[in-house]
């Protein structure tokens, strides 16, 4: 009987403590050392902050590409959780990796087309679909359908503050750099489990 009671209690605890998704409570971009040598990231904004990750998100990015970006171009992304101690999120995922990863510019463009990614329409619209990417100013202003469905267990561990550092690299030299500070929180969470 005690086993049955424990099972019912755990079922209710998890069932009534379901968190629908994560939300972004704050989003702030700042340039860092090395920015503007070959690519100048003018601004990165999410004007509708706070926002949910299971709903469309408006994103505005202004970039001045000052030199061609070809096979020798890379984007290095470092994701750190701002805890004590700070935790570097490893590179992980399927065909398209996420976390602290380094991407080859031309290789990633080809991969997005091969996978028929939703990002392809933006690459076409902003003429970022061929390699090398030629110098130009890009004013990206779109509403993206991120639609991340995150369950309660993941949301508990994912909430918190993060710093995402993006570096543009050509032949080993940093030509652009920017940091995005993001704070994630659980939204639409009910029950005892959500207060943890």
Image (cartoon, grey):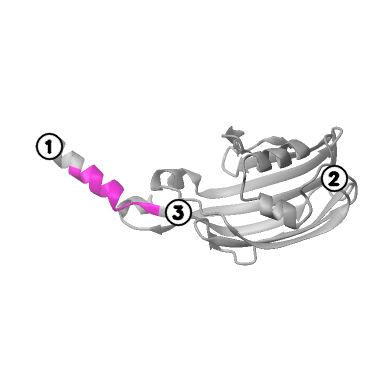
Q: Position of residue 184 (x, y in %)?
A: 53, 53
> In this orientation, which residue lies closer to the viewer: 96 or 154?
96
Q: Secondary structure at mark 3?
A: strand
Kindly identify the residue that appears in the image at 68 percent across and 38 percent down.
111
Judge whether 169 appears above or below 25 on screen.
Answer: above
Q: Position of residue 34 (x, y in %)?
A: 85, 45
From which residue to which does the magenta span run?
8-19
Q: Is residue 146 left or right of residue 13?
A: right
Q: Position of residue 44 (x, y in %)?
A: 72, 58
Q: Is residue 185 left or right of residue 43?
A: left
Asked if residue 59 is among those painted magenta in the image, a careful observer would answer: no
Q: Earlier in the sequence, mark 2 or mark 1?
A: 1
Our reading of the magenta stretch's main secondary structure is helix
Q: CA distance from mark 3 to mark 2?
A: 36 Å
> In this orientation, which residue lies closer to the viewer: 176 or 83?
176
- Per the image, the residue denoted by label 2 is 34
Q: Position of residue 31 (x, y in %)?
A: 78, 52
- Per the image, the residue denoted by label 3 is 21
Q: Is residue 153 left or right of residue 76?
A: left
Kindly identify the residue that appears in the image at 60 percent across and 44 percent down.
82
Q: CA distance from mark 2 to mark 1?
A: 63 Å
Asked if residue 12 is among those painted magenta in the image, a careful observer would answer: yes
Q: Residues within 10 Å of mark 2 (few under 14, many from 20)?
A: some
- Per the image, the residue denoted by label 1 is 2
Kindly identify the residue that appears in the image at 62 percent across and 46 percent down.
117
Dot in front, 3 or 2 = 3
Q: Earlier in the sequence, mark 3 or mark 1?
A: 1
């Amino acid at each position: 009987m005690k086993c049955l009671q424990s099972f019912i209690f755990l079922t209710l605890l998890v069932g009534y403590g379901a968190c629908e998704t994560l939300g972004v409570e704050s989003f702030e971009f700042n340039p860092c050392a090395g920015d503007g040598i070959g690519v100048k990231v003018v601004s990165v904004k999410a004007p509708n902050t706070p926002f949910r990750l299971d709903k469309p998100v408006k994103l505005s990015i202004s970039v001045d590409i000052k030199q061609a970006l070809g096979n020798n171009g890379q984007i290095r992304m470092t994701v750190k959780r701002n805890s004590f101690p700070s935790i570097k999120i490893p590179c992980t995922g399927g065909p398209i990796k996420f976390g602290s990863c380094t991407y080859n510019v031309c290789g990633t463009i080809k991969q997005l087309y091969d996978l028929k990614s939703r990002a392809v329409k933006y690459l076409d619209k902003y003429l970022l679909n061929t390699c090398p990417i030629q110098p130009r100013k890009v004013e990206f202003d779109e509403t993206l359908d991120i639609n991340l469905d995150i369950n309660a267990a993941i949301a508990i561990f994912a909430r918190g503050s993060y710093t995402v550092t993006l570096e543009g690299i050509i032949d080993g030299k940093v030509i652009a750099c920017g940091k995005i500070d993001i704070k994630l929180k659980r939204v639409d969470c009910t029950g005892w489990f959500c207060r943890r």
